[in-house]
Image (cartoon, grey):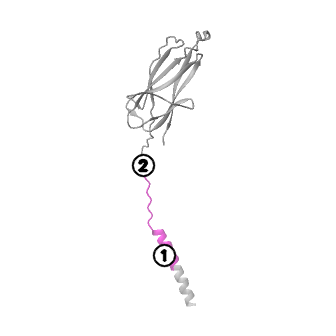
Amino acid sequence: MKSKIKLLIMIIIVVAVVCFVNITRSRYMSEMTAVGNIDAAIPIIVLNEGSLDNQLMLPGDSKTYEFYVGNKDGTDINEVKMNYYIDIVLTKNEIPLTYKLYEVTNNGENEVTKTDGKYGPLVLDYGVEQNRHFKLVIEWNENDNSVTYAGKQNAFNLKINATQVL
């Protein structure tokens, strides 16, 4: 019986100590409000267009349209590497003209290849200013000279499609 009483007293003491320690144990929690800015990388593509002579074209004629694709807009510069395609979208297509795109470099002119109907892919780098020079040559085959083309027109838009290179 004495051992049962001692065991009971020990259990009461242990329970009391555990309760007392839990109550008196210091708990410290701190909350802090933090403010920070997260900036996403800025993609910049600038199309600087030239002008196209609006004089009549005749079979056998050729016209050149020059433009630039850059990665700097004022003081901001492109922050991501991008692949881009140049698309010539015909809004009027009444004359049988052909279009070829050339990139003009210090080493001369290189024809830009077409992929899925668009010119490219071309690469626009980041962190270093780039201003790539292009020349669009528009030609009318002299043998395709039907009188039905008289008074007809072609019109086009340049479209730049870019995706970030990961």
Q: Nearer the viewer, residue 75 or 157?
A: 157
- The numbered mark, 1 or 2, whose residue comes first in the sequence reads 1
Which residue is pictured at 47% across the width and 72% down the height? 21
- Residue 42 point in image, percent of width and height: 44, 37
Find residue 34 and name its label. 2
Q: Nearer the viewer, residue 8 or 109?
A: 109
Q: Quadrant of the N terminus?
A: bottom right
Specify the quadrant of the image occupied by residue 43. Answer: top left
Local packing at callout 2 (Cα closer than 10 Å; few below 14, some 14-19, many 20+) is: few
- Residue 134 point in image, percent of width and height: 45, 26
Chain part drawn in magenta: 13-34
> Outermost residue toward the bottom?
1
Compared to residue 141, the image places residue 160 above or below, namely: below
Find residue 17 and name its label. 1
Which residue is pictured at 51% across the width and 76% down the height? 16
What amino acid type is highlighted by mark number 1?
Val
- Residue 90 point in image, percent of width and height: 57, 22
Which residue is pictured at 47% across the width and 37% down the height? 82
Give the CA separation, mark 1 to mark 2: 40 Å
